[in-house]
Every structure is written in C-alpha cells, then in structure tokens.
C-alpha cells in the first residue's frame, strides 16, 4: 500500500466486520497499522482521509500500539495482512 508507506504506516491489516466476512453496505473498513516512530496525528489523519477517498468508504485506521488490552487479542486474531 503505497499510501500507507508514504504516511509512515506498515504492516497494514484489515480487521472487524470486513475481516470476518460480516460487512454490509454500511460498514466501514477497520485497518490496523504499525506506525513509524515519528508519525504524528496529522499524518495518521491524512492516511485515513486518503484511504477513505480512494476506497469511497469510511475508514478507521488504528495504530496497533494504541489497542487496549481488552480487545487486543481479538483484533490481532482476526486481522488479515494486506
């Protein structure tokens, strides 16, 4: 994913309803990413916006380092590398 690399994201994985095959026309796309150490909120927001425009669907980009322990195992177990 060229956009992700340009914005300092790597190891892009899809999770949530899309990964489980339970998505509907109203579903967003949940993406889990590892961010380079110097990536800030502006770059993360830019990545989210660019992907949403490209895919024409709402996108939620979640840095893996910010996953709460309560959902971490579930998210990681269903995440599919892109």
Image (tube, rainbow, N blue to C red):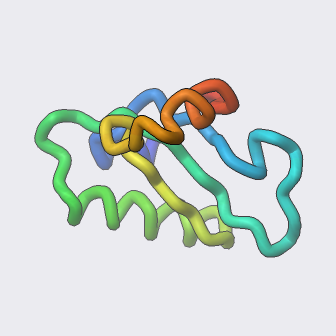
Number of callouts: 0
Above or below, 65 against 25 in this view is above
Towards the viewer: 35 or 55: 35
Residue at the spot 28% in from the left edge and 41% down from the top edge: 8
User: Of all residues shown, which one is farthest toward the left?
Assistant: 38
Residue at the spot 86% in from the left edge and 71% down from the top edge: 25
**Quadrant into which the C terminus falls:** top right
Above or below, 36 against 4 in this view is above
In the rendered structure, the answer to whether residue 66 lies left or right of residue 18 reads left
Towards the viewer: 28 or 67: 67
Residue at the spot 48% in from the left edge and 40% down from the top edge: 70
Q: Is residue 1 visible?
A: no
Q: Is residue 48 visible?
A: yes
Q: Position of residue 76 (x, y in %)?
A: 57, 28
In the rendered structure, the answer to whether residue 9 lies left or right of residue 53 reads left
In the rendered structure, the answer to whether residue 42 lies left or right of residue 48 reads left
In the rendered structure, the answer to whether residue 7 lies left or right of residue 24 reads left
Q: Position of residue 59 (x, y in %)?
A: 57, 63
Towards the viewer: 79 or 47: 79
Q: Position of residue 40 (x, y in %)?
A: 17, 54
Above or below, 72 against 16 in this view is above
Residue at the spot 41% in from the left edge and 44% down from the top edge: 4
Q: Position of residue 10 (x, y in %)?
A: 39, 32
């Amino acid at each position: 994913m060229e956009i992700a690399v340009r914005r300092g994201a790597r190891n892009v994985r899809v999770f949530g309803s899309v990964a489980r095959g339970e998505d509907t026309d109203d579903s967003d796309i949940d993406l889990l990413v590892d961010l380079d150490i110097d990536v800030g909120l502006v770059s993360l927001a830019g990545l989210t916006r660019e992907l949403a425009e490209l895919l024409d669907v709402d996108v939620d980009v979640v840095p893996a380092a910010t996953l709460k322990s309560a959902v971490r195992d579930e998210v990681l177990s269903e995440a599919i590398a892109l």
